[in-house]
Amino acid sequence: MNSFVVILLLVSLSVANSHNIMSIFPTCDEFSQLMSEKFKELRDNGEITRDSCQGSRAECMKLNMEKVRCEIDAEPSEECMAEVETFMKGGICSK
């Protein structure tokens, strides 16, 4: 499930406006902020760029986000993980 959070964060970082996919997971705000700050730091230092790896853009983005994630010691809160899991399993759907 951690990989899904990273994917969501990747999408949120690539969206210019503040109304991104992570806004539907308010319990993930703190972790999302950590990821965003580290992403900006590594980008500003030139450690990650769109051109910093070979292969497709998607593969490059994946490698860059793995680098960002591995630079952060923290983990998403249990509440964040539960909220994402509930969403992924359809627990938000009225059937």
Image (cartoon, helix red, strand yellow):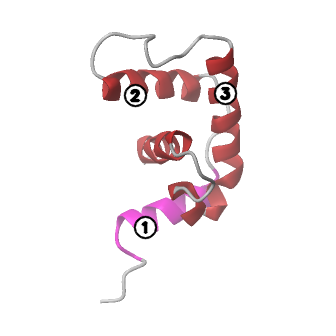
Residue 44 lies in the magenta stretch = no
Please state which amino acid type lies under the numbered disc 2.
Lys
Residue marked by disc 1: 87
Q: Nearer the viewer, mark 2 or mark 3?
A: 3
Q: Give the image quarter of residue 37.
A: top right
Location of the C terminus by quadrant is bottom left
Position of 29 with respect to 51 (left or right) is: right
Report how far apart the C-alphas of labels 2 and 3 lie in the structure. 16 Å
Viewer-proximal residue among 71 and 12:
12
Dominant secondary structure (helix, strand or loop) of the stretch shown in magenta: helix
Crowding at mark 2 (Cα within 10 Å: few <14, some 14-19, many 20+): some
The correct choice, above or below, for 95 with respect to 59 in the image is: below
Residue marked by disc 2: 62
SS type, badge 2: helix
Residue 87 lies in the magenta stretch = yes
Viewer-proximal residue among 68 and 58:
58
- The residue at the point 63 percent across, 46 percent down is 32
Q: Nearer the viewer, mark 1 or mark 3?
A: 3
Report how far apart the C-alphas of labels 1 and 3 lie in the structure. 28 Å
Residue marked by disc 3: 40
